[in-house]
Amino acid sequence: MPRPVLAALVLTVLAHPAAAAEKRVWRVDSVVATQAGGTVVVEVKGAVQSGGWNRPRLKASHGDAHTLVVEFVAQAPSPSAVVIDGLLPVTAKITINAAHGAVTVRALGQANEVTAQILH
């Protein structure tokens, strides 16, 4: 491989670092779940402990026949990032194809979890 191409590949890798790791947000404050037809819309509000968190989302996890479980995650700031300390609000929403018989949703944060009934 000619040297100019190799140098360009190295620069491309250095300029595009790997995506930040997803971690659970610090705290779940509220969960609202509504069912319409065969889907459940889940909206979760919570907080992270510093600035620099990106792309909050709900990740469906394994539950049982009566409970849908979601993890509230976001991309954490890099360890070397300068961020503001303090609780900052975050929200996320997901639409899930509901299993017949699901009556509750449990949202998991790092410090707590909140369970709510699915509203029809």
Image (spheres, rainbow, N blue to C red):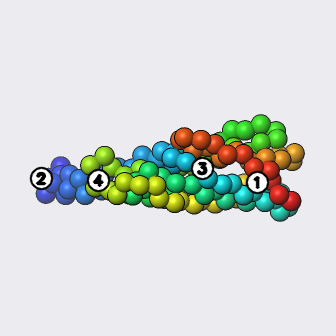
The residue under label 4 is 81
As helix, strand or loop, the secondary structure at mark 4 comes to loop
The residue sitting at 42% across, 46% down in the picture is: 21
Q: Earlier in the sequence, mark 1 or mark 4?
A: 4
Q: Which of marks 3 and 2 is nearer the N terminus?
A: 2
Quick one: label 4 or label 2, which is nearer the N terminus? 2
Q: Report the residue at 26% width, 49% height from top.
A: 80
Q: Which of the labelled discs sits on residue 28, or is there none?
A: 3
Quarter residue 64 falls in: top right
Q: How far is mark 1 from mark 3, CA to CA?
A: 22 Å
- The crowding category of the residue bearing disc 2, from other C-alpha atoms within 10 Å (few below 14, some 14 to 19, many at least 20), is few
Residue topped by disc 2: 3
Q: Distance between the residues labelled 3 and 2?
A: 51 Å
Provide the secondary structure element on which disc 2 rests: helix
Residue 109 on image: x %, y %: 57, 44
* Residue picked out by circle 1: 97
**CA separation in Å, label 4 and label 2:** 33 Å
The label nearer to you, 2 versus 1, is 1
Which callout, 3 or 4, points to the residue nearer the camera? 3
The residue mark sitting in front, 3 or 2, is 3
Residue 63 at least partly seen: yes
Inter-mark Cα distance, 2 to 1:
52 Å
Residue nearest the observer in this picture, 48 or 104: 48
